[in-house]
Image (cartoon, grey):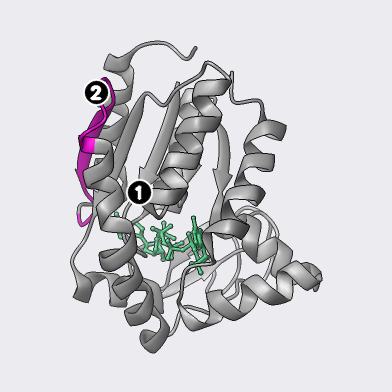
């Protein structure tokens, strides 16, 4: 089963992805995580993508398409695959379709998680992440047992560079202008199932609603 997980910043894509890959034994590719790792490496590519990320703008398609094509090839798209945050433009979606069609493993479902702008700003500014294991917390909604420390690996939690109110408003704008049309693109694709989920519900409820749909689609293939 190949799934695209979409939604505005802070809708809960990363939170849901972690639960879904565990339940359905999927490979998880987050374009944001891939670019953050590149940025942290200090490579020339990392410095370039970091400029766009810190400004809340999308990384240009010509970079994203090549990086994600390579990551998908490495992950073995024939097994189950969950794409989180990619594609984010119609050009990226078309490139992904071409790659998966050539491999004979087209997408099965697109899950779109929604949340309104004020909730998104509250979620993003309160997010804390474990730099070691990647677990995602929120200071108010999903706090760790000990303040600022990861429950799983006891590492000090960090705040992302792009998680300020000013940058998240720019990311929201990018979503509305460049990424929302991707949902419409997928709605016009014949056999593809597009599922909407209310991301403002508690994380367990969002997971249950999405998992129910995925279970109906059938076994991983
Ligand atoms: P990326 O890392 O993908 O960021 P994003 O899309 O802005 O999404 P977020 O990771 O901020 O939010 P999320 O939906 O995963 O929410 P989360 O689960 O963490 O991209 C970053 C940047 O990289 C982009 O701006 C761009 O520059 C670049 N980039 C990446 N992909 C690209 C592409 N394809 N093309 C071009 N550029 C690209 O949850 C958020 C918070 O809410 C957390 O604190 C969490 O604990 C809490 N929370 C989540 N769900 C719930 C819930 N149900 N109830 C209460 N709290 C909740």
Up/down of 34 relative to 120, above or below: above
User: Horizontal placement of 14 versus 186: left or right?
Assistant: right
User: Horizontal placement of 175 versus 91: left or right?
Assistant: left
- Residue 190: give its label: 2
Q: 178 or 54, which is in the foreground? A: 178
Q: Does mark 1 have its CB less than 8 Å from ligand 1?
A: no
Q: Nearer the viewer, mark 2 or mark 1?
A: 2
Q: Which residue is mark 1?
A: 6
Quarter the N terminus occupies: top left
Label 2's element?
A: loop
Q: Is residue 130 visible?
A: yes
Relative image position of residue 45 (x, y in whole percent): 74, 67
Q: Is residue 159 visible?
A: no
Residue 136 included in the magenta stretch of the image: no
At horizontal 81% and vertical 70% (from top left) the residue drawn is 43
At horizontal 66% and vertical 54% (from top left) the residue drawn is 133
Relative image position of residue 136 (x, y in whole percent): 50, 59
Query: What segment is highlighted magenta in the picture?
Result: 187-200
Up/down of 176 relative to 2, above or below: below
The quadrant holding residue 8 is bottom left
The local crowd at label 1, few if under 14, some if 14 to 19, many if 20 or more residues have their Cα within 10 Å, is many
Q: What is the spatial separation of the Cα atoms under label 2 and label 1, in whole angstroms? A: 19 Å
């Amino acid at each position: 089963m190949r799934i695209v997980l979409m939604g505005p910043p802070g809708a809960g894509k990363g939170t849901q992805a972690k639960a879904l890959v565990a339940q359905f034994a999927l490979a998880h590719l987050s374009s944001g995580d891939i670019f953050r790792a590149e940025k942290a490496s200090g490579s020339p590519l990392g410095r370039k993508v970091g400029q766009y990320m810190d400004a809340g703008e999308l990384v240009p398609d010509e970079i994203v398409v090549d990086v994600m094509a390579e990551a998908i090839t490495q992950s073995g798209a024939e097994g189950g695959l969950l794409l989180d945050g990619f594609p984010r433009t119609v050009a990226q979606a078309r490139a992904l379709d071409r790659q998966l069609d050539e491999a004979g493993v087209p997408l099965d479902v697109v899950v779109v998680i929604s949340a309104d702008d004020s909730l998104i700003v509250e979620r993003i500014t309160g997010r804390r992440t474990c730099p070691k294991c990647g677990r995602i917390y929120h200071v108010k909604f999903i706090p760790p047992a000990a303040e600022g420390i990861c429950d799983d690996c006891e590492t000090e939690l960090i705040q992302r560079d792009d998680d300020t109110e000013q940058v998240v408003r720019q990311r929201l704008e990018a979503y509305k202008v460049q990424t929302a049309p991707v949902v419409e693109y997928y709605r016009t694709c014949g056999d593809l199932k597009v599922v909407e989920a209310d991301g403002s519900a508690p994380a367990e409820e969002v997971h249950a609603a999405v998992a129910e749909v995925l279970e109906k689609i059938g076994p991983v293939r």
